[in-house]
């Protein structure tokens, strides 16, 4: 049995939607649909009842689901047994660029000074790639801004911050009145997609409130921040990511009344099971000893 087919089946069963499953698995909806047809053909049974808006498990699918999960859990255990165990004195982290710049210094510096015997290996990855890197054992701990549940991962939210509409103040003349949200978002450049999860829906929300921005996709918070600071456009960014610029007057926050904005969250990911002391201590430091819920 193809393990990838089972992983896709379990994800589709959980979401009851091939499109949502495709987003979580980073593949096309058509590919997910083909995989499920292939699995059904190999079993000779229909696993899903399909209609125009959603899918649901058939009676056979309901019976098959716990067996699929059991096989995936056994496969995960076999992978863990086959992988070389990381050295107790090594901590291999994968973090997103914004996490590395904004959140990590306040936690990692003190921890590293108190653990001089631990070798640190820090890898900066796109948030969407971090869960797979942890699940496959490439890194011991992941910290990123994209929530993706993968079987065998323990996932928990570490931090949450609100979004703010910001504009640069390159002239340094703070006596000038700030532009309004309408000034910025009706025909003005709006730097978007600095987060992989919420920007498409956020643009729809803005348009529902009558705003007509000119979106320019920039997929890095640091680059977006620089462009805004230079006065080239506005953006909606996590407040924690622009706190210094706001405090120093290089950016200004503009009110966006009546618009319910999403929050920006940071998630911790580790593989389920026991960990070397260096890894477990780092997890406990970030979570303050709180247990992580199991994802997948």
Image: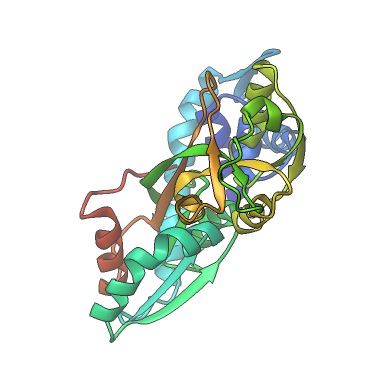
Residue sticking out furthest to the front:
175
**Residue 51 image position (x, y, % from top left):** 68, 13
> Looking at this view, is 17 or 229 the one in front?
229
Q: Where is residue 170 in the image (x, y as percent from the top left)?
A: 65, 53
Colour setting: rainbow
Image x and y of residue 58, in percent: 56, 19
Q: Identify the residue at horizontal 34%, vertical 73% (top origin).
A: 109
Q: In which quarter of the image is residue 165?
A: top right
Locate the C terminus by quadrant. top left
Residue visible at 51% across and 32% down in the picture: 262
Work out whether 198 lies above or below 242. above
Residue 199, horizontal then vertical, whole percent: 63, 36
Q: How many labels does the image show?
A: 0
Q: Which of 36 and 55 is in front in this view?
A: 55
The residue lying furthest to the bottom in this view is 117
> Does the image show residue 192?
no
Instruction: Residue 181: tell me if it is visible.
Output: yes
Q: Would you say 217 lies left or right of 176 here?
A: right
Residue 180, by quadrant, is: top right
Q: In this picture, is 163 found above or below 228? A: above
Query: In front: 215, or 92?
Result: 215
| Side of 69 relative to 276 (left or right) | right
Residue lying furthest left: 289
Q: Residue at x 51, y 52 (%)?
A: 249
């Amino acid at each position: 049995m193809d393990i990838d087919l089972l992983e896709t089946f379990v994800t589709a069963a959980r979401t009851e939607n091939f499109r949502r499953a495709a987003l979580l698995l980073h593949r096309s909806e058509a590919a997910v649909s083909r995989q499920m047809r292939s699995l059904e053909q190999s079993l000779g049974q229909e696993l899903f009842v399909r209609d125009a808006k959603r899918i649901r498990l058939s009676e056979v699918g309901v019976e098959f689901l716990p067996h699929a999960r059991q096989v995936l859990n056994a496969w995960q255990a076999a992978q863990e047994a086959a992988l070389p165990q990381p050295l107790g004195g090594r901590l291999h982290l994968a973090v997103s660029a914004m996490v590395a710049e904004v959140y990590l210094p306040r936690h990692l510096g003190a921890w590293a000074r108190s653990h001089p015997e631990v070798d640190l290996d820090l890898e900066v990855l796109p948030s969407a790639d971090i869960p797979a890197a942890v699940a496959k054992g490439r890194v011991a701990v992941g910290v990123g801004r994209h929530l993706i549940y993968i079987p065998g991962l323990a996932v928990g939210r570490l931090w949450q911050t609100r979004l703010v509409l910001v504009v640069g103040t390159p002239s340094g003349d703070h006596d000038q009145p700030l532009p309004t949200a309408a000034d910025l978002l009706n025909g003005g450049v709006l730097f978007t997609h600095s987060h992989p999860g919420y920007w498409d829906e956020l643009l729809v929300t803005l348009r529902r409130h009558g705003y007509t921005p000119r979106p320019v996709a920039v997929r890095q918070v640091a680059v977006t921040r620089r462009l805004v600071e230079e006065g080239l456009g506005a953006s909606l960014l996590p407040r924690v990511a622009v706190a210094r610029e706001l405090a120093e007057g290089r950016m200004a926050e503009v009110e966006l009344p009546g618009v319910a904005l999403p929050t920006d969250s940071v998630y911790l990911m580790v593989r389920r099971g026991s960990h070397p002391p260096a890894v477990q201590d780092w997890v406990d430091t970030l979570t303050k000893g709180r247990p992580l819920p199991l994802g997948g």
